[in-house]
Image: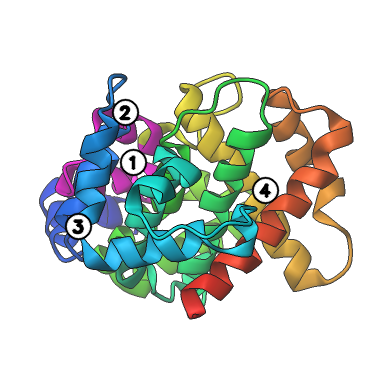
Amino acid sequence: MSASSTALLTHDRLAEASDRLTPLPAAANRLTTMLGDDDIDFRTIVDVVTYDPVLTAVLLRQANSAHAGFVRPTSTVNEAVVRLGLGAVASIAMRTAVAQSLQRSLPVYGLEGRDVLGHSIKTAVAADVLRARCPARVPAAAPTVALLHDVGKILISDVLGSRATELVSDISEVEGVSLVEAELGVFGLHHGQAGVYAIRRWELPLSFVEAMASHHCPPGEGGALATAVRVADEIAHAIDHTDDDDSTGASVHPRVTAALNELGIDEQLHEQVLADVEKRYEWVQAMMAG
């Protein structure tokens, strides 16, 4: 089965699966590409948003929300972009663009219904909180890459279907290895590496490709962007498990503690970081529902 699955998960089939994903609107693509440019023209950002009515409405609503913390409302795109920042603006644009693609059920990965989208947004939110809390620089692209970090699971499932991917879950459970290790054993690559096909299909920056492929690297490996996404993913998984178990808090999870320490976040702030993520995630859910 392992050899057969590896043979089926070819470059061409992954590329074809990525072609079936929802295309990115021009505004989302341009804003995301700007994240890789150190010399960003603010006026250009505003122009991109101004001529996309859906994105303008979403950004104004979020800039005027209670979470944004501003008493005076704004009715201009210019001020909304200033309030939210480029990283948040690009992440919001991407979230609006890929929600349909991520709204999938992947039972083999323990993700039902809207769980894929929910976990992806939770990871993006965690990355956004890390940018605010981390003493070291967290790249502005972190929330956007975090939002897309599991898209490779969708591509693998699309190519191979449930029968082959169920083997990954079985191996992980029986042999006591992670899903990533099981994916490597069965397919010869893991979902982060498969997700690169989506990043290339959407013509996103090279830094996204590198972070997507290496966001499951061990601590100390991979660049700053991949590290931020991996830590955000740990936080999101811990909160997911807390919601499922309704018992121990995510703050006591040793992997989360180690991940936050890796970014230099003082242990006294760990609970506050997790609380910020949960609160902001609830706010994002409410915004999307409204």
Residue ID at (74%, 40%): 255
Residue carrying label 3 = 24
Residue pointed to by mark 1: 193
Which of the marked residues, 1 or 4, is nearer the chain's N terminus? Answer: 1
- CB atoms of marks 1 and 4 within 8 Å: no
Relative image position of residue 166 (x, y in whole percent)? 45, 68
Specify whether 136 is left or right of 226.
right
- Residue 289 at x, y = what percent? 50, 80
Question: Magenta segment, which residues?
Answer: 186-212
In the picture, residue 196 is in which quadrant?
Answer: top left
Q: Which residue is mark 2?
A: 207
Q: Amino acid at mark 1?
A: Gln
- The kind of secondary structure element at disc 1 is helix
Amino acid type at circle 2 is Ser
Q: Which residue is mark 4?
A: 235
Q: Earlier in the sequence, mark 4 or mark 2?
A: 2
Going by the image, does 253 lie left or right of 158?
Answer: right
Q: Label 2 crowding class (10 Å Cα cut-off): few <14, some 14-19, many 20+?
A: some
Q: Position of residue 254 (x, y in %)?
A: 81, 40
Q: CA distance from mark 4 to mark 2?
A: 22 Å
Image quarter (top left, top right, bottom left or bottom right) of the N terminus:
bottom left
Front: mark 2 or 1: 2
The amino acid type, in three-letter code, at marker 4 is Ile
Q: Are marks 3 and 2 in contact (CB under 8 Å)?
A: no
